[in-house]
């Protein structure tokens, strides 16, 4: 076995594939429909994969949010849930888990990650503030802007390179941070935000060394650090794999050290602990008090925060499991397999492989589709048509318009194919890779999209689009010609 007894078992035959270190005990039937039905479904869904019904989907690679497989221990813990409006023992078990795994004293429960962002933004951000960060997440930015703040991304030059072998493309550029502090002054910076396994730029981690450098600068100016820990397990895993000084450390020690450098840690439990819900934690009682009173106002009483007590029990177990290498490395191992295979086939994908999913570079895939016609959205729709696999657009559709109504073109146009933990098998992964390759070989058939119905905020969720020509039908026809009626 590879070091630390992980997913990658060494094969005698030389094959290099990830091996599942779990067995499947509860299963759910999937639906692989004919291409004609998928064509109807995507049309009905406004060429937006968020608007598909899972009855029409084969592999749901939209996200890992709320879709990771739960463990037997998580499921059985739900049976001991303590129903109480206030003072539930389930909450205190979760608080104990957070204290142990994140090393933070106080916990504010919320119904999901963006609810934490709402509270943090309302409490700490005032009009005219700037918030430096490695990269934004969609809901993060929306809440910060709603409260008058401006997001300033200070990533390194490596961050947006599609092909790279840099191990930590999620790092903050410390020179840019120093420049920002000199330009705006520490008073206009309510906090610096670190996002673990930077979601929108390909699930790329930051290094402990980088966090230490940022922390030293923040301390010298009295600036708070806020850590979005939604994908912290994977980031910790990458630190252990890629940062020399941490090769012998336990994941728990790495998690503790990461969280110790942040004054506030918040998370989406839909990701980090394979449940639903979220939370904000801190060891600073003053910061805790500043946020506390918004929890009953927006979420629910302080010992449930809008979550069911059953979920809270499973969350506690999920946090302990975040320290288990075989669990947190499962998704990265499959992502790595998919990325390396697609790369070998010449398909443009973000390298090195990161957390959460395999990210296909839509501008490299569809160079003939202008960014104004949303290549990542078009690629997501096209892949669904030819495979039944649902990915997520992470590009200009997920961005917004400026004051003049023009699209703000995204830094990257990505099709994200998520690998929720312990959900897909290797043969399903190989099926996805096969269909992506077929689509790549037939990429000239894919055209662009335009909006038909466009909500003003977070338009990627509910927006409806249409193809700029009849390319979806032509693509389906070619698929049928090549596959002869097969699914
Ligand atoms: N922060 C990060 C880094 C996230 O990835 C997410 C959600 C959130 C905050 C918000 O959490 O959904 O519980 O409100 N990411 C999901 C995704 C939606 O598909 O990547 P939430």
Image (spheres, helix red, strand yellow):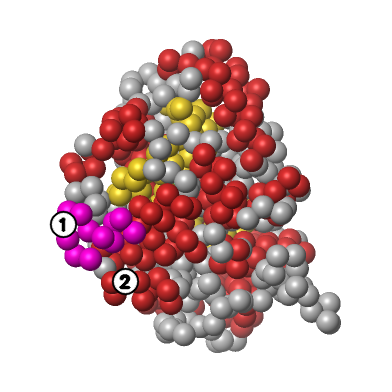
In the displayed structure, would residue 140 be above or below residue 383?
A: above
Label 1 packing within 10 angstroms: few (<14), some (14-19), many (20+): few
Does the segment drawn in magenta span residue 84? yes
Residue found at the very far left of the displayed protein: 85
Q: Of 169 and 81, which appears nearest the observer? A: 81
Residue found at the very far right of the displayed protein: 13
Q: Report the side of 307 relative to 153 (left or right).
A: left
Q: Report the side of 142 relative to 64 (left or right).
A: left
Q: Confirm or deny contact between disc 2 and disc 1 (CB under 8 A).
A: no
Q: Earlier in the sequence, mark 2 or mark 1?
A: 2
Q: Report the side of 307 relative to 322 (left or right).
A: left
Q: In the structure shown, which secondary structural element does the residue marked by tag 2 occupy?
A: helix
Horizontal and vertical percent for residue 176?
Answer: 62, 23
Horizontal and vertical percent for residue 182?
Answer: 56, 12
Q: Of 103 and 9, which appears nearest the observer? A: 103
Horizontal and vertical percent for residue 315?
Answer: 38, 61
- Residue under the point 48% across and 40% down: 227
Q: In the structure shown, which secondary structural element does the residue marked by tag 1 occupy?
A: loop
Does the segment drawn in magenta span residue 61? no
Q: Ligand 1 within 8 A of label 1's CB?
A: no
Residue identified by numbered label 1: 85
- Residue under the point 56% across and 42% down: 258
Stretch of the chain drawn in magenta: 82-93
- Residue under the point 34% across and 59% down: 93
Marker disc for residue 317: none
In the displayed structure, would residue 293 be above or below residue 203?
A: above
In the displayed structure, would residue 476 be above or below residue 125?
A: below
Q: CA distance from mark 2 to mark 1?
A: 17 Å
Horizontal and vertical percent for residue 200?
Answer: 53, 46
Residue identified by numbered label 2: 78
Q: Quarter of the image for the N terminus: give it.
A: bottom right
Label 2 packing within 10 angstroms: few (<14), some (14-19), many (20+): some
């Amino acid at each position: 076995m590879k070091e630390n007894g992980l997913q990658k078992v060494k094969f005698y035959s030389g094959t290099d594939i990830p091996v599942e270190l779990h067995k499947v005990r509860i299963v759910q039937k999937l639906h692989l429909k004919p291409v004609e039905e998928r064509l109807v479904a995507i049309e009905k869904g406004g060429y937006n994969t968020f608007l598909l019904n899972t009855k029409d989907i084969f592999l749901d690679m939209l996200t890992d949010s709320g879709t990771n497989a739960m463990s037997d221990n998580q499921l059985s813990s739900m049976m001991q849930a303590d129903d109480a409006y206030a003072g539930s023992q389930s909450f205190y078990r979760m608080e104990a888990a957070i204290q142990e795994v994140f090393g933070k004293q106080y916990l504010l429960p919320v119904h999901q990650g963006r609810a934490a962002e709402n509270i943090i933004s309302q409490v700490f951000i005032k009009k005219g503030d700037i918030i430096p960060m490695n990269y934004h997440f969609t809901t993060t930015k929306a809440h910060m802007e709603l409260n008058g703040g401006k997001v300033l991304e200070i990533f390194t030059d490596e961050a947006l390179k599609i092909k790279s072998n840099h191990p930590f493309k999620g790092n903050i550029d410390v020179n840019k941070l120093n420049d920002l502090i000199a330009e705006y002054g520490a008073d206009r910076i309510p906090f610096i935000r670190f996002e673990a396994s930077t979601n929108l730029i390909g699930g790329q981690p930051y290094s402990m060394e980088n966090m230490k450098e940022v922390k030293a600068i923040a301390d010298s100016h009295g600036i708070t650090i806020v850590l979005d820990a939604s994908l912290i397990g994977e980031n910790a895993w990458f630190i252990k794999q890629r940062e020399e000084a941490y090769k012998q450390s336990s994941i728990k020690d790495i998690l503790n050290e990461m969280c110790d450098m942040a004054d506030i840690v918040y998370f989406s439990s839909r990701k980090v602990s394979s449940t639903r819900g979220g939370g904000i934690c801190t060891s600073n009682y003053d910061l805790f008090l500043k946020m506390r009173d918004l929890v009953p106002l927006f979420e629910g009483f302080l010992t449930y925060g809008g979550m069911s007590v059953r979920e809270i029990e499973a969350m506690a177990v999920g946090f302990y499991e975040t320290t288990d290498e075989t669990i947190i490395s499962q998704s990265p191992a499959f992502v790595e397999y998919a990325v390396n295979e697609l790369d070998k086939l010449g398909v443009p994908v973000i390298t090195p492989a990161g957390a959460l999913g395999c990210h296909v570079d839509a501008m490299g895939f569809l160079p003939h589709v202008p960014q104004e016609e949303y290549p990542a959205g078009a690629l997501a729709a096209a892949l669904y048509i030819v495979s039944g696999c649902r990915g997520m657009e992470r590009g200009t559709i997920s961005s917004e318009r400026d004051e003049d109504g023009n699209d703000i073109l995204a830094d990257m146009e990505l099709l994200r194919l998520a690998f929720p933990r312990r959900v897909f098998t290797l043969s399903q992964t190989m099926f996805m890779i096969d269909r992506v390759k077929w689509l790549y070989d037939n990429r000239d058939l894919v055209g662009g999209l335009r909006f038909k119905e466009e909500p003003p905020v977070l338009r990627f969720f509910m927006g409806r689009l249409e193809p700029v020509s009849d390319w979806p039908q032509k693509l389906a026809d070619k698929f049928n010609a090549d596959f002869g009626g097969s699914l």
